Image (spheres, rainbow, N blue to C red):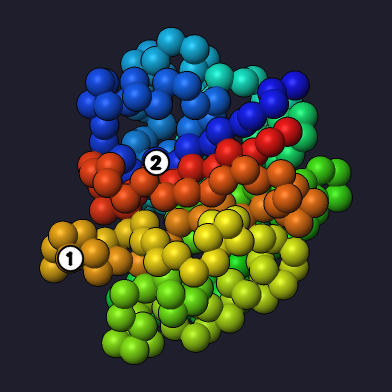
């Protein structure tokens, strides 16, 4: 039994070896926007820091180098699952599940609705409900923690210019309602917002207009947790000062 489990989520983050060693105390690291191909995974495993002997990867096979997730852990999980088990959703490598003694950990990357909202319908009518149902099925046996780029700024506090982004992918009324209906109303807790109800904290800044320098950001990255484990969250936090990506790392500390 591990009394304090700290989970860290990098998203497409490129760190030097010295920078990475700052986080060597972490038990579990989830990497989103894993843009590697399956042929690259063995070489990457060989370069991991000592002690991270358990690593699991999903890569997009429908569009190489497009999307994927990974979980790197000091603790060997009880089981590992790749995808949702639905072929229509699983070719882009967007979900990875590992089982530990006390909970399931999911590393996920929700599809972006895209330019012109071309994938909005797929995202809110197919992907979100399928992911939600999968999480509820897992929850029958133990609590669930989902981390990742969920591509939704849920509330106006989660985006720097809500009035100007009403029809922007990630902040449409449809996506925000889907997030509310499929996750929060089904008992999954936004751990950062529970811990920090009035804090403005962003996890994504677009490169195009230098958003990070002016803090014109979005909170798109989350740790969602089953209600049954949410009270064991010691902290859920954002590290906005760590560069290397247009997303910042986020972390979760569980008291188990």
Q: Position of residue 119 (x, y in %)?
A: 44, 74
Q: Which residue is mark 1?
A: 214
Tell me where residue 32 appears, x and y as whole percent. 42, 45
Q: Is residue 9 left or right of residue 146?
A: left
- Horizontal side, residue 17 vs residue 176: left or right: left
Image point (37%, 57%), residue name:
203
- Residue positioned 36% across, 35% down in the render: 37
Viewport quadrant of the N terminus: top right
* Horizontal side of residue 3 vs 163, given as left or right: right
Q: Is residue 227 above or below residue 50?
A: below
Mark number for residue 10? 2
What x and y, as percent, mark residue 246? 26, 53
- Tell me: 118 left or right of 125: left
Residue beneath the point at 64% across and 20% down = 76
Mark 1 lies on a secondary structure that is helix
Q: Is residue 196 visible?
A: yes
Quarter in which the C terminus is drawn = top right
Residue toward you, 116 or 52:
52
Residues packed near mark 2 inside 10 Å, few (<14), some (14 to 19) or many (20 plus)? many
Specify the quadrant of the image occupied by residue 207. Answer: bottom left
> How many angstroms separate mark 2 from mark 1 (CA)?
22 Å
Which residue is situated farthest in the top direction here? 50
Camera-side residue of 37 and 224: 224
Residue 112 in view: no
């Amino acid at each position: 039994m591990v009394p304090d489990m700290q989970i860290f989520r990098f998203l497409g983050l490129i760190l030097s070896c010295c920078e990475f060693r700052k986080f060597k105390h972490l038990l579990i690291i989830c990497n989103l926007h894993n843009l590697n191909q399956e042929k690259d995974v063995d070489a990457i495993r060989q370069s991991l820091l000592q002690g991270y002997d358990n690593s699991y990867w999903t890569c997009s096979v429908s569009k190489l180098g497009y999307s994927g997730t990974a979980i790197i852990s000091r603790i060997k999980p009880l089981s590992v699952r790749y995808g949702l088990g639905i072929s229509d959703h699983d070719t882009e490598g967007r979900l990875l599940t590992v089982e530990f003694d006390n909970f399931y950990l999911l590393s996920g990357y929700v599809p972006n609705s895209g330019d012109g909202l071309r994938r909005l319908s797929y995202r809110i009518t197919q992907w979100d409900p399928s992911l939600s149902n999968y999480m509820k099925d897992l929850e029958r046996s133990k609590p669930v923690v989902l981390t990742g780029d969920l591509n939704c700024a849920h509330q106006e506090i989660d985006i720097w210019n809500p009035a100007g982004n009403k029809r922007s992918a990630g902040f449409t009324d449809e996506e925000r309602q889907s997030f509310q209906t499929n996750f929060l109303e089904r008992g999954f807790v936004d751990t950062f917002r529970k811990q920090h109800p009035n804090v403005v904290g962003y996890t994504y800044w677009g490169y195009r207009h230098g958003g990070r320098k002016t803090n014109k950001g979005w909170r798109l990255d989350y740790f969602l947790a089953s209600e049954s484990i949410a009270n064991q969250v010691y902290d859920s936090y954002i590290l906005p000062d760590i560069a290397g990506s247009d997303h910042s790392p986020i972390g979760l500390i569980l008291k188990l």
